[in-house]
Image: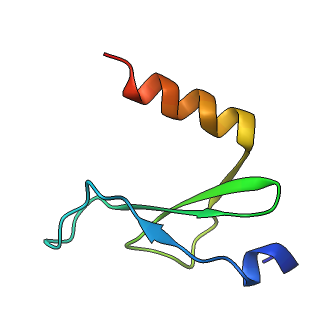
Amino acid sequence: MSTEDAGLTWYKSSYSGNEGGACVEIAVGTATVHVRDSKDVHRPHLAVNADGWAAFVGFAAAD
């Protein structure tokens, strides 16, 4: 875990229900957006730069 990881605040996707299952959490760092599986928070997570995250969100939101 990096120094930045220690101070992260994680947020669960608003599309995730309370039934469990497939949930994604994100945390915004100073230079990256971190993505993890909420069912296994101790596994390594994905970290992408802001431009990469914006491109992903734009693609996911496209019709």
For this orientation, the residue located farthest to the top is 63
Residue 52 vs residue 1, the one in the foreground? 52
Residue 58 horizontal/vertical position (percent): 50, 26
**Residue ranking furthest to the bottom:** 6
Q: Residue sitting at 45 percent across and 74 percent down? A: 40
Q: Nearer the viewer, residue 58 or 21?
A: 58
* Residue 2 visible at all: no
In the rendered image, the quadrant that contains the N terminus is bottom right
- At x 17% / y 73%, what residue is drawn? 18
Percent across and percent down for residue 8 are 67, 76
Is 3 placed left or right of 7 in the picture?
A: right
Q: How is the image coloured?
A: rainbow
Quadrant (top left/top right/bottom left/bottom right) for the C terminus: top left
Tell me which residue sits at (63%, 39%) in the image: 53
Residue 49: x %, y % from top left: 76, 44
The answer to whether 47 is drawn above or below residue 23 in the figure is above
The quarter of the picture where residue 39 lies is bottom left
Q: Is residue 51 above or below residue 21?
A: above
Residue at the limit of the structure toward the left, as seen here: 19
Left or right of 44 on screen, residue 49:
right
Relative vertical location of residue 6 with respect to residue 52 in this rendering, above or below? below
Residue 14 in the image: x percent, y percent? Answer: 30, 58
Q: Quadrant of residue 20?
A: bottom left
Residue at point 58% right, 71% down?
43
Answer whether residue 36 is visible to the viewer in this image: yes
Numbered-mark total = 0
Is residue 38 rendered to the left or right of residue 23?
A: right
